[in-house]
Amino acid sequence: MIAPDVRIEDLDPEGFAWLCGLAAQRQHRPQRWLWILHRGGSLLGCRPTEAREGLELESLDLGSPQIADTLIGRSDYERVVIVDGARTQDLADALDREGDTGRDQADYFRACQEAFWSSAAVSTAPAPPRTSTTWPRLSEALSARELTASCVVVEGSDLLLSLHAHFHLGQLSALTSLHDLSPSWRSWDELATSSSALRASDVVVVTDRQHVEEAFSAADLLGTFIESARNGSAHFARGLERLP
Amino acid sequence: MRPVNRVTVDRGMLDIDGERVRWLSGSIHYWRHDVADWPRLLDGAREVGVTMVDTYVPWEVHESSPGERDFEGRLDIARFIEMAGDRGLRVSVRPGPACGAELPTHGYPRHVVDQAEVQALRCSGRPYVLPSASHFFKVPSYASTRFLSQVRSWYDELGQRLADYQAPGGPIAAIQVDNEMGFFFQAHAYALDYHPECLRQWRDFVLGLHGSLDAVNAAYGSTAASPADLDPPRDGSDPSEVRRVEWLLFREHHVRSTLRRLRDALVASGFDCVVTFHNDYARTETPLDQGALEQSDTVDVAGIDAYSSRKGGPWLSDIGRHLSASSRLPLMPELGSGWIAMPWLIPAAIDARDQEMVAMATFAAGVRGANFYMLADRDRWYGSPMDIHGNLREAQASFLRRFREFLDEAQLEELERVAPLLILEPRAEFRREAARAVLGDIVPAYREVMPFDFGLADPGSSGGAAREWFGALQETARRAEVDFDLGAASSPPCFERYQVAAVPVLECLDSATIAALEASPSTRLLVGGRLPAKNERLQQLGPLPSVLILGSADELSAHLPQPTAWTGDAVAAVFHWRGAERSVLVALNHSDKTRQVNIETTAEGSWRSLWPRSERVARDASEASSAVLPAYGVMAWEVAA
């Protein structure tokens, strides 16, 4: 979710494909959610469809404020989401408002998700999931800065991925890979200084595959990554004190 | 009257003034590269074996301020085309107005889409916000006269600058009309478009169907005093099913008629010598009807785009089957190569290992031409056969070279794929399901915008008895290893090509299928379910030509001919292309494990391997061939007397 002027080009294809795979797994973790759509209490549909008979949905008061809690208690779904099609006006209004604010895309997506979970049309159990706050935190901290940051991920002695990013006033303004890294190195210091872009970066992290994969499994991806890099998980780190 | 094209289509290839040219292209976005890199990029394109380069000509990029258009430096499209032509490459241009391409406003200038009067409207009467790869904007209505007049201005400028580069004298061989038109991926029946001019078109459409306002009122149960009082359905709870279904028919009509207007505008702007084409996004249901685009002379070639990893082989082959049935040049204007650099928006990846299955699964099933999107990396795209500077990535570059060699050796264009069965998508039934959709005001195009299960609001997307029948008929054919084409019952191909045609029916059958059957009485039409009683407008049908009723999809197998190539393996597929004196067999392994596959065929002669290598195979023609296919692997042979 990147602002329109950001250039994302000349990426290392194998490494970035690996990163995309991690992001895909994170985004599409299998979820056992029960979705119910009704209109003023009359069932219109549910997913998975077998829940209709299995939970005898048509015999229930789907408009009741407690119904989501009731169903989560009666079933093994991770989450129950009930949408009343007769009350989505506020959600439609909210989507319109968010689309008119001129904010960036990341904030727009987040606002739409918050609008959904807070809508009078939606009841859910357990409590609504938290929308990500990682990017605003970083943006806020960097709002007065120009910053370059580089990350190199290795697997054993093999280079897996390199990324080089520019931040302008808290927003990502360019993303690319490093193409002048030394193919072999005798120390992490040597690797971290082998590229001119790395030498000039304000923040540098050289880490391994496992560290990145663990961060992608955590709820706060970026915070976990930065914190663990500070605490010694990274092979090399410089400039992390600039980050929140 | 349209002028006679100097570029035409001949047996699945382009005919450029008597020279047959294979449509094998790759996308390079000139404006996203340094001009100094253009020569290396175009040299790379020629070196990997494509015959054409493809590019958008994005209005948004050339016109960043109202009325001020820039064609200098990186934007010198004419120079780019000249350089391609100097290298013997043909060019396919895509001037939009829609492009996608991870552009901030999808190819439309921001100042155009920000005009409130051109914006498409949702069923609530409010604009529709579409997230693009980098920003979001309110989409335009293609019914808006003001919008279309601005598009025409853009086309006229391009015509002045580029029309002289048309074949046969110049490199431009084809021009695409718009891009993936279809209500901006919003297939939900009641999401778009309720712009006043679109509703005027709807009123004209239904009055044309019914003949009079009184007849419309009778059919809809309405009491409109004048045509202007007719109101379209806005939700699946609308009490008139006829009105809801005809609203979907109108949406399909709107796509075709709008594309035709844009095609005519391009021709009037000077692009009157080249093949016109369009690219559906990968959907073969309402509001799209790819076959109808060619049948109605909207465009010369109607293709389908597809992006998939190697795991999507069966799906890709189905797209090939669909194009094979309905197009004079089965084309994939975008066949994924590399991937969008936006992992959080549409997570996927296509790398060199995927490219083989992606290309072979589609061509084996009937595709004749493709454009690899992208041939070169650019802003927001990675993993293509060339990097952003035109340096070849050898794994993918060698695949493309080898693929071109394969196509030239196999000469599939001189053969016919053995597919004696046609399975029709029951469009009339699918439309009835889609017409029950609800919550059109909030359902977004992308799930990332809102965590809402689309299937709840759009029953047409998630199952139903007709859809089960459709899948089961295909499964029966696969088990019998009898290859088939897929068509739309709303725009069926000529039945004479097939021994057997099958279509699911619960109650409705498209009148176009009935007409096709009447024109080809020797083809057996098998109807899964029940004898149809109504047509696509829910009108009672009169006497039907003779059809056979299937009680279950399994009963289809009794009507199928014997296969001519088979493996007996549930996860491997073999396609058979046959000519008078030779055959080509293509075997695909759709599993993640290496498999030993026995291939048997009625084709006789000596075998020669065509893929992955071209070499003679020592094999007795009377023996089954045992091939070891790697995971998601492909092999191909020629069998010749």
Image (cartoon, coloured by chain):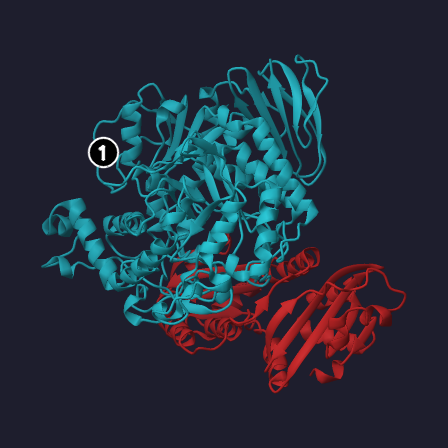
Chain colours: A red, B cyan
Q: Going 45% across and 55% down the picture, which residue do you hit?
A: B78
Position in image of residue B296 (x %, y %): 29, 39
Q: Is B71 on the left-hand or right-hand side of B311? A: left
Q: Going 51% across and 62% down the picture, which residue do you hit?
A: B74
Subunit that carries the residue with mark 1: B
Task: Locate the C terminus of chain B by quadrant.
Answer: top right
Position in image of residue B84 (x %, y %): 51, 48
**Within the image, what quadrant is residue B343 found in?**
bottom right
In the image, residue B26 above or below residue B222: above
**Within the image, what quadrant is residue A77 found in?**
bottom right
Position in image of residue B544 (x %, y %): 25, 27
Task: Locate the N terminus of chain B by quadrant.
Answer: top left
Position in image of residue B475 (x %, y %): 51, 33
The residue beneath circle 1 is B541
- Give the SS element for disc 1: loop
- The kind of residue tagged 1 is Leu
